[in-house]
Amino acid sequence: MTKQQWMAQAPGGDRASGGEARKCPRCQGKLLITRGEVDYAVGEVCSRCAESCPRCSGEGHIFVEHPGGYMTTQECPACGGLRRRVQLFNQARLPARYHNKGLEDFKSYLNPTLRQGIGNLPEVRGVIYTLVNGFIPGDKGLLLIGPVGTGKTHLVVALVRHLTLEKGIACRFIEFTHLLGELRQAFERKDNAADLLDRLSTVPVLVIDELGKGRKTDWELSVIDELISKRYNRCLSTFFTSNYELDAPRLPASGSGRGPVDTATPDFQRAMDTESLVDRLGASIVSRIHEMATVIRMQNVPDHRKLIAAYG
Ligand SMILES: [Zn+2]
Ligand SMILES: [Zn+2]
């Protein structure tokens, strides 16, 4: 029996031909279940569906007899691939509250009547949908820029979910302030700092959420610089989200552009108040990021709480 045949006959399987049996109540036909556990999203193969695996009855491995008469175990050829993908999902360390967020959750926004007033969210979702479907490790990443609450984290979580569970690609998700904290702790303990930096600078896909957030020391910036440089030099795919623009907004010109600038204007004040990624991280890091990732701006997307209120 092939994996496809097992998946077709499992309680949660895709019954394109049968169609009469009801979906597995535990996994709703997805063959796996995810949940938030303390900080991170955790997935597991649906035990009810796994028990129906004809090769391993849910054990995940099979025994193989060799010509010499001895037995070894090997990964179940029917459900092993699914188990490995679930393991990759767990290793990605997605935030717990986003454990079930996929790209399909944006589907309702593709409805023409629901698209009004949500800016370019459907277009951004479309770009990511196309990207993940054709994704090959090493492809250029994305930098999603936009205000808080516009769905950036949901989009990159959905990207990781798809790449791990559907394509079996190793990913790691980390929020920028956690990245700094973990690196600092690791270096202070003097135990696995190099390991951590090594893992983050070699994982095929890295997502850094909330780039530029929080206060940073020169030491932290130098470690970030090292991480970004290593990934840049190794041509590894890296994705970012940020509330900050790449560079500082241009100060409003006054009159001919040569006269004194009116520092009392709202535009001038806004420009002075708004920090950019260059301000936060330095020009050299931002320059590398710009080469590693295509910039996409969330335009006219309202805060998600307003979206939920409007569209349920
Ligand atoms: Zn199931
Ligand atoms: Zn199996």
Image (cartoon, rainbow, N blue to C red):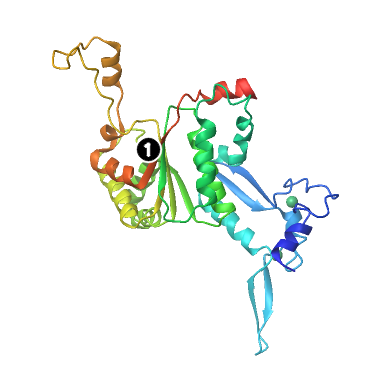
Give x and y (percent) for residue 120.
50, 29
Residue tagged by mark 1? 211
Work out whether residue 152 or residue 214 is closer to the camera in this orientation and state it: 152
Q: Is residue 233 left or right of residue 64?
A: left
Q: Residue furthest right?
A: 20
Quadrant of the image for the N terminus? bottom right
Q: Residue at x 75, y 63 (%)?
A: 5
| Quadrant, the C terminus | top right
> Residue 224 or 217: which is nearer the viewer?
224
Please give the count of numbered marks on the rendered protein.
1
As shown in the figure, which amino acid type bears the numbered disc 1?
Leu
Residue occupying image coordinates x 61% and y 32%: 110
Residue 101: tell me if it is visible. no
Which quarter of the rendered image does ligand 2 occupy? bottom right
Residue extending farthest bottom: 68
196 with respect to 59 (left or right): left
Other-residue count near label 1 (Cα within 10 Å), few / some / many at <14 / 14–19 / ≥20: many
Question: In the image, is residue 123 above or below residue 48?
Answer: above
Residue 139 appears in the picture as rendered? yes
The spot of residue 282 in percent (x, y) is 24, 38
The residue carrying mark 1 has its beta carbon less than 8 Å from ligand 1: no
Task: Name the residue located 56 percent from the left edge and 48 percent from the top edge.
Answer: 162
**Rendered position, 221 above or below 195:** above
| Residue 69 image position (x, y, % from top left) | 68, 88
Instruction: Name which residue lies at 56% across and 21% down.
Output: 306
* Element type at mark 1: loop
Q: Is residue 83 above or below residue 111?
A: below
